[in-house]
Image (spheres, rainbow, N blue to C red):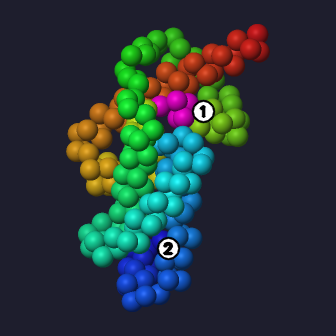
Amino acid sequence: MSNNKDIELIKSIKKGDVAAFSQIIDMYQHMAFTLAKGIVKNLQEAEEVTQDAFVKAYKSLDSFKGDASFSTWLYRIVYNTAISKLRSRKPSTEDLESKETIQYEANYAENNMHRLELQERKKVLKKALSNLKEDDAFILILYYYKEQSIEEISKTTGLSVSNIKVKLHRGRKQMQTELNAILKGELNSIL
């Protein structure tokens, strides 16, 4: 969706056109829900986060200046709302760096990923992604699934570019470890 179309809808909303906000919701609800679910990893909480994010976006629409695209602005609200939900749910997150990567397992996972059919790949990737730290999973989703640049992710999350690069590196490393574990388990169950 073009940023110009978003800006026109936002102008209409500010003039009191509630139907225009319904159009915004229709355009971005799937994206918002996907991102929220990637962070909170719970269907009901993701729905709550998505609803809360749209309410916050509506209430703070006057603060949208148009410097970045509307989707980036909305990503930021969804991200912050989901992180707030996590903080209220649990006091700490687990340290992902505690797992070591073994080169043999990395090669094994890579070879087996090429043999899986597309549907099976998606299932395995989703399972591995759900095991990642919420921040790392969110950044990987933005980078690979939503194809945002590191600079856009920096704007969305409020993290520095160098911090995003570190999180992407760690996220890839952890993703590899998770994929190795999943695929090794599948092979053992076959044998």
Please give the name of the residue rendered at 54% of the width and 76% of the height, measured from the top-left corner: 22
The image shows residue 25 at horizontal and vertical percentages of 52, 70
Vertical arrangement, residue 166 with respect to residue 57, above or below: above
Q: Quadrant of residue 15?
A: bottom left
Q: Are marks 2 and 1 in contact (CB under 8 Å)?
A: no
Left or right for 114, reference 50: right
Q: Magenta stretch containing residue 129, yes or no?
A: yes
The image shows residue 37 at horizontal and vertical percentages of 53, 47
The residue tagged 1 is 127
The image shows residue 123 at horizontal and vertical percentages of 66, 36
Q: Which of 93 and 74 is in front in this view?
A: 93
* Amino acid of disc 2: Ile
Please give the name of the residue rendered at 32% of the width and 50% of the height, measured from the top-left corner: 157
* Residue 18 visible at all: yes
Please give the name of the residue rendered at 41% of the width and 72% of the height, measured from the top-left corner: 58
* Amino acid of disc 1: Lys
Q: Magenta stretch containing residue 166, yes or no?
A: no
Left or right for 62, reference 17: left
In 3D space, how far apart are the residues under numbered discs 2 and 1 (Cα atoms)? Answer: 30 Å
Outermost residue on the right side: it is 190
The residue tagged 2 is 24
Element assignment for label 2:
helix
Provide the residue span drawn in magenta: 127-132
Element assignment for label 1:
helix
